[in-house]
Amino acid sequence: MAVEKVYTKPKCLLPLSSGFCPGCLHSLATKLIAEAIDDLGVAEKVINVLPVGCATMNSLYWKLDMV
């Protein structure tokens, strides 16, 4: 019996573990946005705009253009 893969990391994210605090939900927001980008097939059209504070760690996880 073959094992079915039910989850894969979004393609527009680098294969790294999140460094966000467990309870802050930044990692969940990042994952949900990445899944939407992959589902819509728009990774080559997306520019990630970095905020201030701990969310700037997002620059470490994306395979996207950033400003």
Image (cartoon, rainbow, N blue to C red):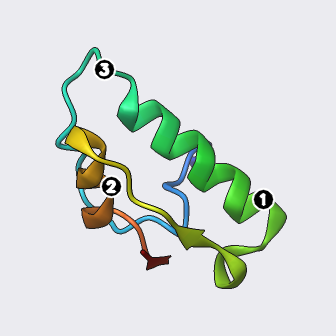
Instruction: Quickly name the residue at label 3.
Output: 24
Instruction: Quickly name the residue at label 2.
Output: 58
Relative to 8, does residue 25 appear above or below in the rendering? above
Q: Residue at x 69, y 61 (%)?
A: 37
Distance from the alpha carbon under mark 3 to that under mark 1? 25 Å
> Is disc 2 placed on a helix, strand or loop?
helix
Distance from the alpha carbon under mark 2 to that under mark 1? 20 Å
Is residue 57 rendered to the left or right of residue 34? Answer: left
Is residue 14 rendered to the left or right of residue 36? Answer: left
Question: Where is residue 13 drawn, in percent x and y?
Answer: 44, 64
Q: Earlier in the sequence, mark 2 or mark 3?
A: 3
For residue 21, the mark is none
Q: Residue at x 72, y 51 (%)?
A: 36
Q: Quadrant of the C terminus?
A: bottom left
Q: Residue at x 22, y 41 (%)?
A: 53
Other residues around mark 2 within 10 Å, as few (<14) / some (14–19) / many (≥20): many
Q: Quadrant of residue 44?
A: bottom right
Other residues around mark 1 within 10 Å, as few (<14) / some (14–19) / many (≥20): few
Is residue 44 rendered to the left or right of residue 12? Answer: right
Question: Where is residue 22 drawn, in percent x and y?
Answer: 23, 21
> Is disc 1 placed on a helix, strand or loop?
helix
Quick check: can you spot residue 25? yes
For residue 39, the mark is 1
Q: Earlier in the sequence, mark 2 or mark 1?
A: 1
Other residues around mark 3 within 10 Å, as few (<14) / some (14–19) / many (≥20): few
Q: Kindly identify the amino acid type of the residue bearing the numbered disc 1.
A: Asp
Q: Earlier in the sequence, mark 3 or mark 1?
A: 3
Asked whether 52 or 5 is in front, the reply is 52
Q: Kindly identify the amino acid type of the residue bearing the numbered disc 3.
A: Cys
Q: Kindly identify the amino acid type of the residue bearing the numbered disc 2.
A: Asn
Q: Residue at x 82, y 63 (%)?
A: 40
